[in-house]
Image (tube, rainbow, N blue to C red):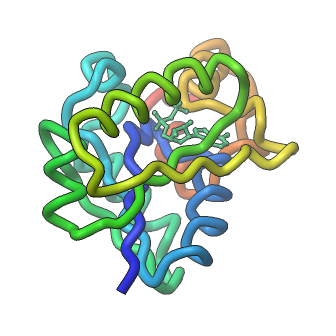
Amino acid sequence: MKVGLFPGSFDPVTNGHLDVILRAKEIFDKLIVAVAVNDSKTSSAMFTLKERQKLLEEVCKGVPKVEIICFDGLLLEAVKKYKAVSVVRGLRAISDFEYEFQMAMMNREITSDYDTVFLMASHSYSFVSSRMIKELVKFGGDVSPFVPPAVMKALKNKKHI
Ligand code: ADP
């Protein structure tokens, strides 16, 4: 059973994330989408951990082979716990590459138990990020083309837009 693990802050899940999930699940027997409890982004998160997890569950409802979990601490520990053979990451731009390259190299120095699989962002979502969604929402922009309907609803409730 080949398990892939797709970690992120998902604050909130976007159509770009969903695109990676749907493509990655074709590569593995099972895809674990792992919501990070603590990372540099979540200290300023718009959605709580539970909300981020719930939105992912709603968005992935009925999608076979996909499971949503939360993880705290080292990615490495989550990889071990769920017996993942690969970590999945999305690549949007050169700015993503720099960070992802460092992280993949560092993790490989620590362990050779798993490898990182990078999926290029689909053209139509290559500019979509959770940060940009939140900024747009703050200023009253329409983000409906970039997020699933459940997230749109949650953003409206959060910000009363
Ligand atoms: P963001 O960078 O949008 O705040 P996360 O930290 O939750 O999102 O990212 C989790 C993973 O999803 C990362 O590997 C990131 O590069 C990838 N990702 C985020 N948005 C997209 C997108 N639009 N297309 C492809 N991959 C993406």
The image quarter containing residue 95 is top right
- At 39% from the left edge and 66% from the top edge, which residue is drawn? 57
117 vs 5, left or right, is right
Looking at this view, name the residue that lies furthest to the right.
123
Between residues 159 and 40, which one lies in front from this camera angle?
40
Image x and y of residue 80, in percent: 17, 60
Image x and y of residue 78, in percent: 19, 54
136 vs 53, left or right, is right
- At 26% from the left edge and 37% from the top edge, which residue is drawn? 48
Q: In the picture, which quadrant includes the N terminus?
A: bottom left
Image x and y of residue 32, in percent: 36, 66
- At 33% from the left edge and 28% from the top edge, which residue is drawn? 106
Image x and y of residue 15, in percent: 66, 50
Q: Does 104 sit above or below residue 140? A: below
Between residues 141 and 80, which one lies in front from this camera angle?
80
Between residues 103 and 48, which one lies in front from this camera angle?
103
Q: In the picture, which quadrant includes the C terminus?
A: top right
Q: Does 60 sit above or below residue 134? A: below
Looking at this view, name the residue that lies furthest to the top.
139
Ligand 1 is found in the corner quadrant, namely top right
Q: Give the mark count.
A: 0
- At 23% from the left edge and 69% from the top edge, which residue is drawn? 83
From this viewpoint, is residue 147 visible?
Answer: yes
The image quarter containing residue 142 is top right
Between residues 60 and 107, which one lies in front from this camera angle?
107
From this viewpoint, is residue 152 visible?
Answer: no
109 vs 19, left or right, is left
The image quarter containing residue 74 is top left
